């Protein structure tokens, strides 16, 4: 049994997102011997590209499962096109208004006074409600991607968030801590003022333990695909606490660091979403010269502020045996026991950068 995982380029030169297509099964056989999944869809134009990619390379107009990890526009917008132009059997997406009275009220405000909502909250709700409406119009059943959701064949499952943790995160999204927001703004200003260069090598790591991402990012569905014992992890924009909870689940099943054959670098390689401790649990200890698996990060063509990806992050994966391949405007494909694909060549991963940005805070 084989698989193909395709990370399509998303956005323009300086903005990115996630648009992932994959299939597994007997890839040399007929369509009914294969399962096709889409995880996030980028912006609207990226949804068009996903549809074309699936028709051309998977030879089908049917998708067995679409997963919306979280409602950021760079992840959710293109899924509307996928649902409209392909036959989708099932959609996994969170319905925040079903878990929070405040979210339910905010959803109602969208229809007549959307300007009263914070811009970030408004954008998220608009993306989610639009996708829900398309799914209903197309007759696509919706289920929510909470911990322990498992596909019928048992090969694809959700490791997080749990429903309880999701509700906690919704409370933070609806009423963000103003002190934390002010601190984040101050830290961003300091980062821009203090950015310099520091040395790293195979054993020297400057990635810190204090990376924090938004509550909305931590709502991301974290998914595991396991094909003939080969584990492949998809992380969305999840941060350290969400990844830690998912690892608790994996470790309870006997997971050992380095068991992954493939891993998506969270949040396009941001230094705020991972830490040395979480990567030690996920990938193993630093200082490895041998390759254990492959990592992909969906990133824009340009990275002027050294955020997506951060060299600290790609270095941290590489020194644990997981070299990182970047999209940067090009589709990247990871395969096992799959037919050769015309026009595709080997990808070169990021090297170990000996000079990385020193951002003061992370």
Image (cartoon, rainbow, N blue to C red):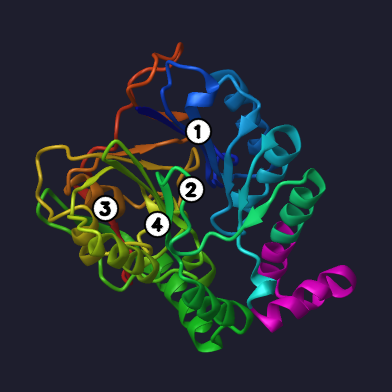
Where is residue 38? Give x, y as percent: 55, 40
Q: Earlier in the sequence, mark 1 or mark 2?
A: 1
Q: How many marks?
A: 4
Evaluate whether residue 6 shows in this view: yes
Q: Residues within 10 Å of mark 2 (few under 14, many from 20)?
A: few
Kindly state the secondary structure of the residue where label 1 is placed.
Answer: strand
Q: Measure how far apart labels 1 and 2 are at the Cα level.
A: 10 Å
Q: Is residue 109 left or right of residue 159?
A: right
* Residue holding disc 1: 35
Give me the disc on residue 80. Answer: none
Of callouts 4 and 2, the N-terminal one: 2
Label 2: element kind: loop
Q: Which residue is mark 3?
A: 356
Sequence-wise, the earlier of marks 4 and 3 is 4
Out of 159 and 122, give the one closest to the viewer. 159
Which of the image's four quarters has the C terminus?
bottom left
Specify the label residue 151 is tagged with: 2
Q: Nearer the viewer, residue 67 or 324?
A: 67
In the figure, 341 relative to 334: above or below? above
Res. 8 visible in picture = no
Task: Give the residues drawn in magenta, as a range.
Answer: 100-127
> Are there few (<14), some (14-19), or many (20+) residues within 10 Å of tag 1?
some
Q: Which numbered disc, 3 or 2, marks the residue that appears first in the sequence?
A: 2
Closest to the observer, 169 or 43: 169
Q: CA distance from mark 4 to mark 3?
A: 13 Å
- Residue 270 numbered tag: 4
- Check if mark 4's residue and mark 3's residue have beta carbons within 8 Å: no
Q: Position of residue 220 (x, y in %)?
A: 50, 61
């Amino acid at each position: 049994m084989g698989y193909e995982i395709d990370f399509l380029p998303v956005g323009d030169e300086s903005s990115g997102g996630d648009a992932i297509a994959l299939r597994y099964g007997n890839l040399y056989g007929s369509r009914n011997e294969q399962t096709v999944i889409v995880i996030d869809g980028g912006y609207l134009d990226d949804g068009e590209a996903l549809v074309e990619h699936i028709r051309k390379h998977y030879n089908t107009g049917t998708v067995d499962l679409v997963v919306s990890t979280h409602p950021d526009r760079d992840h959710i917008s293109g899924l509307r096109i996928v649902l409209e132009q392909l036959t989708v059997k099932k959609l996994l997406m969170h319905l925040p208004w079903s878990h929070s009275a405040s979210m339910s009220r905010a959803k109602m405000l969208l229809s007549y006074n959307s300007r009263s909502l914070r811009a970030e909250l408004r954008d998220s709700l608009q993306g989610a409600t639009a996708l829900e409406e398309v799914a209903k119009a197309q007759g696509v059943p919706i289920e929510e991607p909470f911990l322990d959701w498992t596909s019928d064949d048992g090969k694809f499952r959700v490791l997080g968030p749990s429903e309880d943790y999701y509700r906690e995160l919704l409370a933070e999204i609806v009423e963000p801590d103003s002190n934390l927001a002010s601190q984040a703004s101050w830290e961003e200003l300091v980062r821009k003022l203090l950015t310099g260069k520091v040395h790293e090598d195979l054993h020297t790591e400057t990635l810190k333990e204090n990376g924090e991402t938004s509550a909305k990012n931590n709502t991301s569905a974290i998914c595991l695909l396991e094909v003939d014992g080969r584990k492949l992890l998809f992380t969305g924009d999840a941060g350290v606490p969400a990844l830690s909870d998912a690892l608790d689940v994996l470790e309870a099943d006997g997971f050992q660091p380095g068991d992954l054959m493939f891993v998506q670098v969270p949040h396009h390689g941001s230094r705020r979403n991972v830490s040395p401790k979480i990567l030690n649990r996920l990938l193993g200890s630093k200082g490895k010269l041998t390759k254990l698996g492959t990592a992909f990060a969906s990133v824009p063509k340009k990275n002027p502020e050294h955020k997506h990806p951060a060299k600290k992050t790609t270095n941290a994966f590489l020194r644990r045996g997981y070299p990182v391949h970047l999209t940067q405007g090009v589709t990247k494909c990871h395969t096992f026991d799959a037919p050769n694909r015309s026009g595709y060549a080997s990808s070169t991963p990021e090297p170990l950068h000996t000079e990385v940005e020193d951002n003061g805070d992370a």
